[in-house]
Amino acid sequence: MEFLTDYGLFLAKVTTFVVAAFVIAAVIFSARRREDHDDEGELRVRKLNDQYRKLKESMQTRLMTDAEYKLWSRKKKKEDKAEKKAEKKSKGQEAAEPDKPRIYVIDFDGDIKASDTDTLRRSVSAVLSVANPETDEVVVRLESGGGLVHAYGLASAQLDRIRNKGIALTACVDKVAASGGYMMACVADKIIASPFAVLGSIGVVAQLPNFHRFLKKNNVDFEVLTAGEHKRTLTVFGENTEKGRQKFLEDLEDTHGLFKEYVSERRPELDMQAVANGDIWFGRRALDVRLIDEIKTSDEYLLEACDRGEVISVYFQRKQKLPEKLGLSVSAALEHTLWKALSVLRNQKIQ
């Protein structure tokens, strides 16, 4: 018993020491990261040329025999050594030689509030600080079904900054760029989409329920007090009037008009009467009505770009707080469970 007691005390001391050391190390590491990066996040830059090259080499080596791999490995080492020597020699000559074209890649994944606009803003600012209008290009991989007018108006204005600087801008749409998403895409000098990407939806929609009759039936009064004739048009709980409804429709028409003007200014070749009716087109049909310029996936376009210059992915990574991380984990787990349950039900129906 005495041995067990001593051993327990020793174990407790060791555990306390390890935990204390871990806490101190974590505090130091966190402090250093705060010095190196913005408290709100950090800019991440990745060369996609290297990523695609490694992917190609990985595939090639897996198809080789042992003898072929040995020969390839020796040759690769010699090439890497020669490349490093060439880089050292060219360092002094870089100023005199013209810059190699750079293709900056920015991703935008839009929800109804265009929440990714803040990261887009920072990424655009970073790229504009170094991009050369004469040689460089910006590629935006865009995915969005649209959302709030003012939110997507701001997101589109961020892309306008690139165009205003005279830098070539290409929008790649693999899945969807509709409504506010297309408002962003139309800013680009060139729009590329996959064969079945959804594009268009140049229209405006607003919908809201009204509980006035329910409240009236249950003897519940609801009052809306305003100063200004048009301060409130349609409400959720109050009684909506025909005059208020007409003003609301006028506002929607005005917003639609602004949307059409914005698209028309950036893609003057479009027949706005034909495409601005709120309809959507799949990739190949969108090409026919000139909503896009080419049928191609973003992967194809970027692989071709690697032959033209340096392809660099730029992304501002916002720091997530603990509640956000936990919320995302729970959300992902629920989504996974839901899809698994739906998959099981579907299989049962098939059988």
Image (cartoon, rainbow, N blue to C red):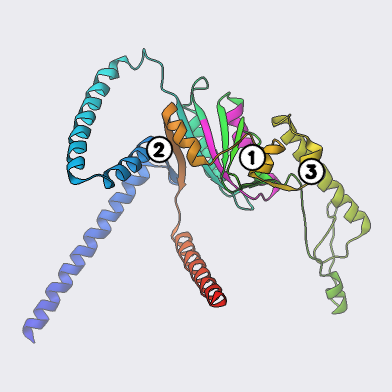
Which of the labelled discs sits on residue 256, or is there none? Answer: 3
Dots 3, 2 in contact, CB < 8 A: no
SS for dot 2? helix
Residue at x-position 40% and y-position 38%: 48
Q: What element carries label 1?
A: helix
Q: Is mark 3 on a helix, strand or loop?
A: helix
Can residue 230 be seen by looking at this rendering? no
Q: How crowded is mark 1: few (under 14 residues within 10 Å), some or many (20 or more)?
A: many
Q: Is residue 309 left or right of residue 92?
A: right
**Would you say 263 lies left or right of 249 here?**
left
To which residue does mark 1 refer?
Answer: 184
The spot of residue 333 in percent (x, y) is: 47, 68
Q: Which residue lies furthest to the left in this view?
A: 3
- Alpha carbon distance from label 3 to label 2: 39 Å
Residue 150 picture quarter: top right
In the displayed structure, would residue 336 be above or below residue 108?
Answer: below
Please give the residue where the numbered disc 2 appears in the rendered image: 48
Q: How crowded is mark 2: few (under 14 residues within 10 Å), some or many (20 or more)?
A: some
> Which amino acid, by three-letter code, is at mark 3?
His
Q: Do callouts 1 and 3 mark residues in contact (Cβ within 8 Å)? A: no
The quarter of the picture where the N terminus appears is bottom left
Q: Position of residue 174 (x, y in %)?
A: 56, 45
Which range is magenta? Answer: 138-163
Q: Is residue 199 above or below residue 93?
A: below
**Residue extending furthest toward the right:** 242
